[in-house]
Structure formats: C-alpha cells, structure tokens
Image (cartoon, rainbow, N blue to C red):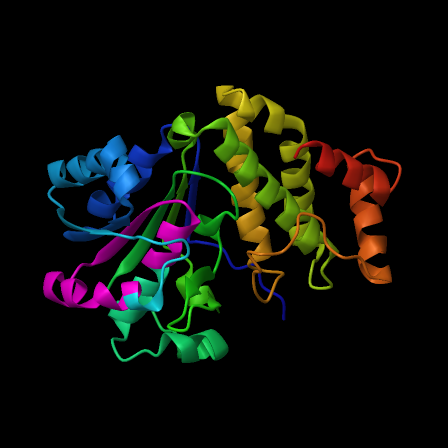
Amino acid sequence: MNMLNLPKKVYFKPGSMNVALRELSEVYHLKRAFLVSDPVLYRSGAVRDIDGWLRKRGIRTAEFFSTGAPPSFAHIRSALPKLLEFEPDVIVGVGGGSAMSAAKAMWALYENPDLDLSAAAEQPERIRTGEKAKLALVATSFAGGAQNSPFAVLQDDAGALRVLRSFQLLPEISVTDARFTETLSPAQVKSCGLTALSLSVRAFADPGCNEYTEHLLREAAGLILKHLPGGEAGQPDALEHLHNAAALVGAACGNVLETLDPAAPLWPAETDADGARIAVLARDLGFPDAAALRAACEALR
C-alpha cells in the first residue's frame, strides 16, 4: 500500500509562524521548548523573536546553537546532556537544512539516548520519536525543503556524510514563512533555488515518483524556473514562491527518494528511463524536450 507521508500540520504564508507557534501553547499545551538554530540567525534577531514570543505565552525555553554544515554526530551528541536536563516537550528547529537536520537528529537522540546514529542511518527502524516531545520546524531559507522531509543530513565521526531517513523524523508542525527569506543575499537565493530545482528534476525522474508526488515536483520546478531571477532581485512575491517551491520539493522527495546526495551535480546523469521521465517533465513545463529544459536550468546558474 502506498502512503503520502507529510508533517501533521503544514503552515505556509508570510506571517504564518505566529499562528503556527501559537498552537504549541493553545492546542498542545506545551511548557518547555528547546530551540535549535545557529549563531548567525540568533544575531539577526530571528531566534530572539521566536524565543520571546514563546516566553510570553508561558513556554520556558532553552537554546542550543547548531554549528557545521552538515552538523556532526559529535555535535548532535553534545546537546544530549542539556536536553536531558531541560526535559523539553517540544523541540523547535529554526534555520536552513543544517539546523533542521540537527533538530531532527537531536529529537531522535533525546527520545532514545542510547541510539547509535551511524546504525540508524543504515537501519532507520531504530528511530522512534514522539514519546517525550514533539518537533516543530521553521524554515528560514529554502533548498531541500527540510521542514517537510524525513531526511537529516549529518557528518559521522570519520567525516563522511550520513543521511538519516525515517518518517519518524517528520515534524508535528512545519512552517514555511517567507518573511524569513527577506534577508537572504542574491547568492544565497540562487544557491537555494538551484538546489531545489535539481532535487525536483531528480525526484521526478526517480522510479518511485507517482501521481501524487509528480504534481508537487512539477509545480515546484515551474515556480523556480519562473521566479528565481526575481528572487535574486529581492522581490517579495518571488521569494515567497521560491520558499513554497522548496517546501513542495521536500514533501515530495521524502516520499520518492531513499536518500539525499548533497554533492550531486545540478543535472542528473541520464539513463534511458531517466531521460524519458525528464522529457515528460520538460513537456509538462512547456519545453520541447529534455535538452531544452536542461538549457533553461543551466541558464539560471
């Protein structure tokens, strides 16, 4: 039986963060929030605002700054003593893919302090969540749509990339609030957009793509091709479309791909089957063939 696995609640719209986080106190009646972010976001004021907002509603907070892209196993483990001492009933990840990956992995480790992260990457059934705390993810940039995906990209103790993939890592609440994208530089917007575009093409070409996910991926690719130049110019409407597009990519990829490869090139190496699927995507997007779609993607570099 097929199933489309998504976060329980997906919020999207500029200003939606306040509505989403209000649920933590008013609907879930949570009392202790463990914030996972990075120092740059904290200095920008984004995390301070969320922290203050939660405190005003009677939710105690503790903070842990994620460093490294991707975060390391050692860094994830270093958060465990603070988690066990604070005993949060919700973990709130605020940031891009690295901060959200860290929040997911810390959640898994908090739920099971004896969890071997390396073994969990090979045997995702080891991951069990939801007994001690819930997870909320607030995306402040866009690329892989980590707020809607079951992936956590980490670095193991030997320095190799490891990817956790488990639907147990999907958050209770995901937030795609484009207000956070207003401070992104043109270079950051381009990098995020190209990553999301590459993932949308790869996932569409994957044999696991189905009628549900292909519509999400087609919409995402079309939005990125249309709005990336405007996003680089700082146009708010374009940034909102790009933020939403990446969220769609994350939702679809988690239900299609078995893993992520952060080092993959922009355009996938085509087998005959891949080429046929990409040709379908190209025609759906108004291009005569896969080569024309590839040229349009390359032109955005």
Residue 189 lies, with reference to residue 270, above or below; the image says above
Q: Is residue 118 magenta?
A: no
Residue in the picture at 74% in, 63% down: 207
- The picture quadrant where one finds residue 18 is top left
- Residue 146 location (% of width, % of height): 46, 51
Q: Which residues are magenta?
A: 75-103
Q: Is residue 79 magenta?
A: yes
- Residue 52 location (% of width, % of height): 16, 36
Looking at the rendering, in which quadrant would you find the N terminus?
bottom right
Q: Is residue 48 visible?
A: yes
Looking at the rendering, in which quadrant would you find the C terminus?
top right
Left or right: residue 169 versus residue 57 is right
Which residue is nearer to you in this view: 186 or 227?
186
Residue in the picture at 27% in, 80% down: 114
Main SS category, magenta section: helix
- The picture quadrant where one finds residue 152 is bottom left
Left or right: residue 275 versus residue 45 is right
Residue in the picture at 26% in, 55% down: 91
Residue extending furthest front? 158
- Residue 294 location (% of width, % of height): 78, 41
